[in-house]
Image (cartoon, grey):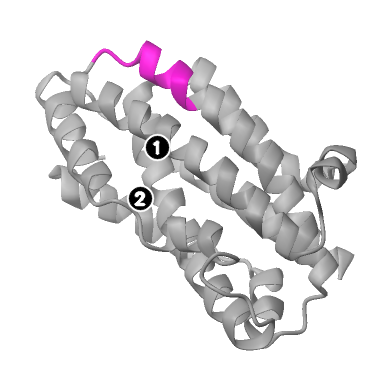
Amino acid sequence: MTGSAGERLAAAQRQFDEAGGENRLIRLIETGTAPLEVVGALAAEQHRVITSDWRAFLTLAARAEEPNARQFYSGLASGEAIALERVAVLARHCGMDAEAVRAYQTQPGCQSYPSYVASLALNGDPLDVLVTLVAGFGGWGGYCATASRGLREHYGFDDEGCGFFDLFADPDPSGALLAEAAIDAGVAAGWTGEAVADQVRLLQHYEHQFWNTLADLA
């Protein structure tokens, strides 16, 4: 994996976007044909994803030696606190209170993604993982933007109800700047990013598995 930080991130994003497979649930939400109960299931699954990813990002922040990478992961962890609040609001708009979210039984296909991220947090090179996650966030952000539009247009959701998806559809640009600075520093220190391609391949698979497992519930 060669090139500038921007080129490396762009290459990983292309791989994620071109990996194939269809996100079937996002098409259902976009057209208003996904049952509201399935959107509620998404919120409940995301509650588990967020709590797992929060710990994973803190672990990566602790393991990262490069200061920009450490700050990048610390920022991700802080963002999960906001996401957890907003996903609870999304659940309520779908008719699920806190007790219903706690009682919800997760789908194995939805929890493969956070399990893989947790594994990367423990076993992956923090810079390899950083590039992998940035590529995944690019795909996730696009799906969230589509979900926000669909919920507003077909389900009558307001800004509060769409706040969870809006959070990821319009991310803070400071994270991208930290990512590029971390990669530049890593390259200067001899980092090669040799594991990125395989990690992106797997992450993209688990991302689509999350959405399509929920689509099957519909």
Question: In the picture provided, is 162 more to the left or to the right than 13?
Answer: right
**Helix, strand, or loop for circle 1?**
helix
State whether the magenta stretch is mostly helix, strand or loop. Answer: helix
Query: Where is residue 24 drawn, in percent x and y?
Result: 70, 72
Magenta stretch, residue numbers: 57-65
Q: Quadrant of residue 111?
A: top right
Q: In the image, is residue 61 part of the stretch drawn in magenta? A: yes
For the residues labelled 1 and 2, say whether their Cβ atoms are less than 8 Å apart: yes
Q: The residue under label 2 is which amino acid type? A: Ala
- In the picture of the structure, the residue carrying the numbered disc 2 is 12
Q: Residue at x 43, y 63 (%)?
A: 169
Which is more toward the observer, 59 or 104? 104
Q: Quadrant of the N terminus?
A: top left
Query: Where is residue 45 drawn, in percent x and y?
Result: 74, 46
- In the picture of the structure, the residue carrying the numbered disc 1 is 196
Q: Residue at x 38, y 12 (%)?
A: 63
Which is more toward the observer, 86 or 32? 86
Query: Where is residue 5 drawn, in percent x and y?
Result: 17, 43
